[in-house]
Image (cartoon, grey):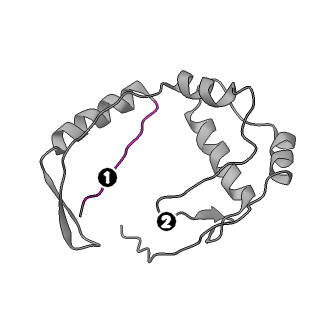
């Protein structure tokens, strides 16, 4: 069985850190306790890809943005709201999470306009989704 693990970093410092870590892990074996399996790690590609500025330019300067967006969560995903985990997707929770993550990442563009956020939430809807669940065990 072959699996691929893609790790993205948006700062040069984090990219360099991950690159060194990946080189240390290359040709090693890791053990995943939940699966009770050992996996051989082989480094295939390290790419510098986008900078923060490239990323911003690509997504914020599109002349005609797409009307529909397809989002695929490739790992189990949940959202915490009012201290409880919510299993089903919700536009408010998805957009709030995206805004928080962007604001934590951004060094110049910050989303803080509550009226714009509410307008986006009102005009956005989930057309359909495929829901599946997996057992999740939190271990400290």
- Residue 83 lies, with reference to residue 60, above or below; the image says below
Which of these two is toward me, 3 or 105?
3
Magenta run includes residue 9 = yes
Q: Residues within 10 Å of mark 2 (few under 14, many from 20)?
A: few
Task: Report the quarter where the C terminus lies.
Answer: bottom left
Q: Position of residue 58 (x, y in %)?
A: 60, 27
Name the mark on residue 76.
2
**Quadrant of the image containing the N terminus:** bottom left
Query: Chief secondary structure of the magenta span?
Result: loop
2 or 1: mark nearer the eye: 1
In the rendering, at what x and y percent does residue 118 appear? 84, 48
Q: Which residue is mark 1?
A: 4
Q: Residue at x 72, y 40 (%)?
A: 66
Picture residue at 41% right of the left edge, 71% below the top? 138
> Picture coordinates of residue 9 (x, y %)?
42, 35
Residue at the image point whose x is 49% and y is 65% from the top: 76
Q: How many marks?
A: 2
Residue 65 on the magenta span: no
Range covered by the magenta-colored residues: 2-10
Q: Nearer the viewer, residue 83 or 50?
A: 50
Image quadrant of residue 63?
A: top right
Task: Decide which of 99, 127 is in the foreground and name it.
Answer: 127
Kindly identify the residue that appears in the image at 60 percent across and 69 percent down.
130
Q: CA–CA distance between discs 2 and 1?
A: 16 Å
């Amino acid at each position: 069985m072959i699996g691929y693990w893609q790790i993205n970093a948006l700062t040069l410092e984090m990219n360099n850190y991950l690159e060194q870590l990946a080189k240390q892990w290359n040709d090693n074996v890791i053990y995943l306790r939940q699966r009770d399996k050992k996996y051989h790690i082989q480094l295939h590609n390290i790419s510098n890809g986008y900078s923060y500025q490239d990323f911003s330019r690509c997504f914020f300067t599109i002349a005609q943005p797409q009307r529909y967006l397809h989002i695929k969560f490739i790992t189990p995903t949940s959202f915490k709201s009012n201290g409880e985990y919510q299993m089903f997707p919700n536009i408010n929770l998805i957009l709030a999470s995206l805004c928080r993550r962007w604001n934590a990442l951004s060094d110049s563009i910050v989303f803080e306009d509550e009226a714009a956020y509410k307008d986006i939430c009102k005009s956005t809807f989930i057309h359909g989704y495929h829901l599946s669940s997996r057992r999740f065990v939190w271990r400290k």
